[in-house]
């Protein structure tokens, strides 16, 4: 019969297992966490930087319960450890051979304590003991002496996360100490060293030169997959002082460290933290991490902010009750440097890096590798924050695809964008490139900018808007071909005797009015799927547009969708043959057809979200992919909070504004600008370390709509929350054929001294 034995039943064992002669605990020393969910537990955020680095023991009391800390990194970390152990078995684990029996017993005690008691007790949702029961004599054994093993034929430790099982009772004779260390190493994330006092070993005169008259601690076994700059195997058999031989100024704490080890009581757990910086994300770094005396180190000139890590070890020390071995263990945390910056800790970290030279162990600067990465890491962690805005435009000039002579003014250089800002251009840069991928703290471009395709940032605002069917979106990124493209479109319009516009939103309506007013002799037909035009607005706008269509002679076909061929209606020749063009037949879903020599598609906007779709895969929290959380799967827009931050709580430093934001506001310039202002103020708050308090209030939808070359209307839906029932309508006749584009150039800071400047 197989029984799954809840580890609670073993608590009496535990009480004895960690009991010391002097300290008899009155309650269980290991507090079970029955509801602990490792997947949803983020790794601890340890931020141990101080402006001056002084070498001290700096230990803090902990509890036996907290000996091992679990979090969402568990599975990827233990999986990686399994691979490391397979690749480097002789480097990452070992038991002292000259003191075999002592090392052996300590490893066995560690193994049975962790797997047989601690883990199933503390984390029963992750680990359990499985007991095979049968009638028979009770078993006995050194470390099982306190278990009630009557009728138990065997017991297994089962790791519910990895599915792996390991024997607990009886321990097979084939299960040697290295095999036990392997199992421990693959079961917990912590690296472990067992140390015995020379007088506790069975052979204290092995000629290893303890020199301390006995009683010094010596490493007798280890499993260490995350060595930070040392080969763990080289530490085996060494005394504490020799283990720390390369550490600068260790002599300042060495004697007290040895005394502390000597006084360490069974059942007591203490912790301390240690930190450094590295320019990559690997945890197995036996070499090339520290700089030892006599080694030369080249200063690095650049640092990849996504790769660079602040590496923190949470170190624990305790003593096992039976062999009296000291257990020194540590869990390695890797925090992206960019994460520190995003938390506003950049300056603190920069001070701490500089402070490595400043304390009672100035050699730490070289030893920890500061000599290599210190300057670039300080620069990067320093005070200035990098804020990136992706997208910088204000679309909405379909007229220039119809009327000629102004198309070159539609493309305004970004060269003077920041010339009017108070701080001036040196701190503002414009990168002319397409963003292809967003990671939590870097943006990847489609081309090099300032020698790199990767831009690190602290805060990023997505303002990539939407794209339209031609001619609303240019086929290329450069001005001359785009101007030529618009001119070609104008020519096609000129030569076509009939034009059908598909879609009765703002773009379709404006183009239809422009076309019919500029070319009264052409047949202009607008086809719209519903009866009401501009359906996001009060029906008064639809009625107003219908009246204007009648006045201009625009034909309106409503109530059925056009069947758009795959690839759209874009396969029309660019040339103007002056004799009109071949007709295209449009099929409506209700069976109606109509023909036109030119078809213009104005059927909505597609969000420019492609570069966001990789965001989830960069997440290292072990959580499920979350692009669906970043981007609203129903419409492709970015989920945002009223602060314009991404709704996805993992990215409080990412914002979206304008058309790309799923804000509940209508897609227009005015709400976009209000959102941009809110996002900017919230970024400033975050930089100051404050809460982002500004929120956007969604106002009733409004639009400034052209109804021909000069007619236009300012229309706003009624504010029903304020009790309004009628829309605001302001019909005007003050428009200009060039739409006042010269003024936009001025607002963009471009000084135009001659008409030629518009061709820049
Ligand atoms: C034809 C038309 C007429 C309009 N008329 C009006 C009007 O009269 N009044 C009004 O208020 N609103 C109008 N609008 C709406 C208004 O133009 C938009 O609401 C506004 O432009 C949205 O601004 P945005 O910055 O969010 O996005 P956009 O203006 O779309 O700008 C986005 C920018 O991001 C860039 N981009 C996209 N992807 C990337 C990437 N991966 N990497 C780098 N850059 C990228 C794009 O090239 C573009 O330059 C109109 C829109 C259209 C299409």
Image (cartoon, rainbow, N blue to C red):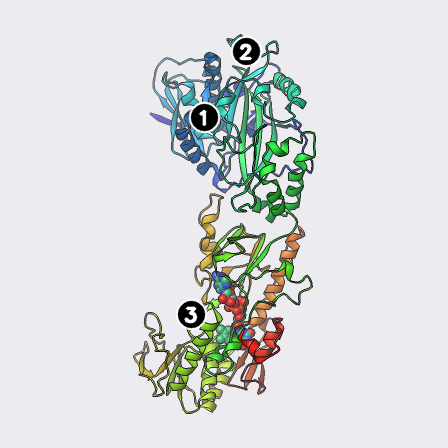
Frontmost residue, 114 versus 754: 754
Distance between mark 3 and mark 1 Cα atoms? 57 Å
Neighbour tally class for label 1: few under 14, some 14-19, many 20 plus, Cα within 10 Å: some
- Whether disc 3's CB lies below 8 Å from ligand 1 is answered no
* Image quadrant containing the C terminus: bottom right
Q: Is residue 675 left or right of residue 530?
A: right
Frontmost residue, 586 versus 480: 480
The first of marks 3 and 1 along the sequence is 1
Label 1 near label 3: C-beta < 8 Å? no
Residue 440 tag number: none
Distance between mark 1 and mark 2 Cα atoms? 26 Å
* Image quadrant containing the N terminus: top left
The residue positioned 58% from the left and 54% from the top of the image is 459
Residue 319: percent from left, percent from top: 56, 20
Residue 132: percent from left, percent from top: 36, 23
Q: Secondary structure at mark 1?
A: helix
* In front: label 2 or label 3: 3
Neighbour tally class for label 3: few under 14, some 14-19, many 20 plus, Cα within 10 Å: few
Q: Is residue 465 visible?
A: no
Residue with the mark numbered 1: 91
Residue with the mark numbered 2: 200
Q: Is residue 491 visible?
A: yes
Distance between mark 2 and mark 3 Cα atoms? 79 Å
């Amino acid at each position: 019969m197989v029984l799954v034995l809840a580890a609670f039943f073993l608590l009496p064992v535990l009480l004895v297992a960690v009991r010391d002669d002097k300290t008899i605990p009155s309650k269980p020393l290991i507090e079970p966490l029955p509801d602990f969910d490792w997947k949803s537990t983020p790794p601890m955020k340890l931020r141990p930087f101080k402006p001056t680095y002084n070498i001290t023991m700096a230990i803090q009391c902990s509890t036996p319960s907290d000996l091992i800390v679990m979090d969402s990194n568990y599975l990827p970390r233990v999986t990686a450890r399994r691979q490391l152990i397979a690749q480097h078995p002789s480097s990452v684990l070992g038991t002292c051979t000259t003191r075999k029996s002592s090392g052996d017993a300590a490893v066995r005690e560690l193994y049975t304590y962790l797997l047989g008691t601690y883990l199933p007790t503390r984390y029963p949702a992750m680990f359990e003991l499985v007991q095979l029961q049968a009638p028979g004599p009770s078993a006995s054994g050194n470390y099982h002496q306190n278990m009630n093993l009557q009728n138990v034929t065997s017991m297994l430790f089962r790791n519910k996360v990895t599915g792996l099982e390991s024997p607990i009772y009886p321990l097979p004779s084939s299960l040697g100490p290295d095999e036990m260390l392997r199992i421990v190493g693959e079961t917990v994330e912590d690296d472990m060293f067992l140390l015995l006092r020379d007088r506790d070993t069975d052979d204290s005169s092995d000629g290893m030169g303890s020199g301390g008259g006995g009683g010094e601690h010596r490493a007798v076994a280890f499993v260490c997959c995350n060595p930070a700059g040392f080969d763990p195997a080289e530490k085996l058999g060494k005394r504490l002082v020799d283990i720390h031989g390369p550490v600068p100024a260790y002599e300042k704490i060495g004697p007290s460290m040895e005394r502390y080890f000597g006084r360490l009581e069974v059942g007591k757990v203490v912790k301390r933290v240690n930190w450094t910086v590295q320019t990559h994300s690997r945890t197995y770094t036996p070499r090339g991490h520290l700089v030892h005396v006599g080694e030369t180190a080249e200063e690095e000139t650049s640092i990849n902010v996504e790769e660079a890590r602040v590496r923190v070890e949470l170190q624990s020390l305790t003593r096992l009750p039976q062999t009296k071995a000291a257990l020194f263990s540590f869990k390695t945390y890797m925090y992206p440097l960019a994460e520190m910056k995003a938390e506003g800790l950049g300056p603190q970290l920069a001070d701490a890096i500089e402070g490595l030279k400043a304390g009672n162990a100035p050699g730490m600067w070289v030893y920890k590798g500061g000599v290599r990465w210190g300057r670039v890491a300080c620069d990067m962690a320093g005070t200035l924050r990098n804020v990136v805005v992706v997208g910088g435009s204000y679309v909405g000039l379909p007229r220039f695809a119809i009327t000629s002579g102004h198309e070159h003014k539609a493309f305004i250089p970004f060269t003077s964008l920041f010339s009017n800002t108070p701080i001036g251009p040196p701190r503002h840069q414009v990168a002319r490139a397409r963003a292809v991928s967003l990671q939590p703290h870097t943006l990847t471009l489609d081309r090099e900018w300032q020698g790199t395709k990767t831009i690190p940032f602290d805060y990023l605002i997505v303002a990539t808007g939407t794209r339209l069917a031609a001619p609303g979106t240019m086929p290329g990124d450069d001005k001359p071909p785009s101007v030529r493209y618009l001119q070609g479109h104008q020519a096609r319009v000129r030569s076509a005797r009939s034009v059908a516009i598909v879609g009765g939103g703002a773009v379709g309506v404006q183009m239809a009015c422009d076309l019919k007013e500029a070319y009264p002799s052409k047949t202009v037909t607008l086809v719209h799927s519903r009866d009401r035009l501009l359906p996001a607005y009060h029906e008064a706008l639809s009625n107003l547009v219908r009246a204007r269509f009648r006045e201009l002679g625009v034909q309106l076909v409503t109530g059925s969708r056009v069947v758009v061929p795959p690839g759209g209606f874009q396969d029309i020749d660019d040339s103007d043959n002056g004799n009109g063009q071949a007709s295209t037949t449009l099929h409506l879903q209700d069976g109606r057809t109509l023909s036109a020599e030119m078809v213009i598609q104005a059927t909505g906007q597609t969000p420019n979200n492609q570069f966001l779709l990789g965001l989830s895969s960069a997440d290292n929290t072990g959580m499920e992919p979350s692009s669906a959380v970043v981007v609203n799967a129903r419409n492709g827009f970015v989920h945002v909070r009223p602060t314009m931050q991404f709704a996805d709580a993992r990215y409080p430093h990412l914002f979206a504004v304008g058309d790309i934001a799923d804000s509940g506001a209508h897609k227009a310039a005015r709400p976009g600008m209000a959102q941009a202002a809110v996002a900017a103020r919230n970024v400033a708050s975050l930089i100051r370390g404050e809460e982002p308090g500004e929120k956007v209030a969604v106002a009733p939808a409004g639009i400034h709509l052209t109804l021909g070359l000069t007619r236009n209307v300012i229309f706003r839906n009624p504010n029903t929350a304020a009790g309004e029932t009628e829309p605001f309508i302001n019909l005007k006749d003050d428009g200009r054929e060039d739409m006042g584009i010269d003024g936009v150039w001025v607002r963009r800071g471009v000084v135009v001294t001659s008409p030629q400047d518009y061709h820049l």
